[in-house]
Amino acid sequence: DGGITQSPKYLFRKEGQNVTLSCEQNLNHDAMYWYRQDPGQGLRLIYYSQIVNDFQKGDIAEGYSVSREKKESFPLTVTSAQKNPTAFYLCASSIPGTQMNTEAFFGQGTRLTVV
Amino acid sequence: GNSVTQMEGPVTLSEEAFLTINCTYTATGYPSLFWYVQYPGEGLQLLLKATKADDKGSNKGFEATYRKETTSFHLEKGSVQVSDSAVYFCALSDRGGSEKLVFGKGTKLTVNP
């Protein structure tokens, strides 16, 4: 079945460590996104990529990094520079917005906790 | 910039009650509008969408109409079920698709038997 797979589902990180969240899709979508979800704040865009080897900062990119070496994969690294990394992270993909009826497909999320 | 404002929750209803969750938006162009649903511990699923003014999106008994004159996209369901308990997000995209979705803060719905 086609879809988006995020791993791991739960992740614990010590302060000062970098950690990488995985996101893989087999939907053949060009565009991929990372969102952060905090209680009572909805979803905020961290980074997005419209095509392989290209990505742009979203609204809260500080302390995060991404790569897009393959169409199927868009890993997110939470660096030690991110001051408050504990959150629920959601990856999504879509066909770029040249078609009026596109929708975003989301993974199941990764809950990151700093200990 | 673009923004979405949802009614704040939580919302608690009895089974078979009528549901309305208000959503208004601010956008410079002609956005597409979406409602997503999130069940506990899961990602978001698209519930319904509308891409132009006066369009009505519908799915699983839920409906929302794109009202350009009031910049609104309110979610309604005539008779809720316990299984509808979830968090509902209103969202917009300013490029006609799902690029750079801007989300509201979400409304938690609990339906009691």
Image (cartoon, coloured by chain):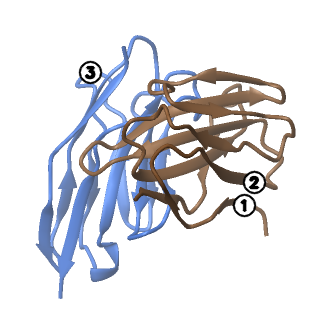
Which is more N-terminal, label 1 or label 2?
1
The chain letter corresponding to brown is A
Foreground pick, A28 / A11:
A11
Please give the label number shown on residue A20. Answer: none
Residue B49 is situated, as x and y percent measured from the top left of the image, at 48, 44
Residue A63 is situated, as x and y percent measured from the top left of the image, at 51, 30
Q: Amino acid at mark 3?
A: Glu
Residue B101 visible here: no
- As drawn, B54 above or below A84: above
Mark 3 or 1, which is nearer the eye?
1
Mark 2 or 3, which is nearer the eye?
2
Count of numbered labels shown in the rendering: 3
Q: Residue B9 sits in which quadrant?
A: bottom left
The quarter of the picture where the C terminus of chain B appears is bottom left
Outermost right residue: A70
Outermost bottom residue: B113
Please give the label number shown on residue A3. Answer: 1
The chain letter corresponding to blue is B
Residue at screen point 58% across, 30% down: A47
Please give the label number shown on residue B69. Answer: 3
Residue A111 is situated, as x and y percent measured from the top left of the image, at 47, 60
Q: Is residue B27 left or right of residue A51?
A: left
Q: Which residue is mark 2?
A: A24
Residue at screen point 51% across, 26% down: A61
Image marks 2 and 1: residues in contact by CB distance under 8 Å:
no
Residue at screen point 43% across, 69% down: B41
Foreground pick, B12 / B59:
B12
Q: Amino acid at mark 2?
A: Glu
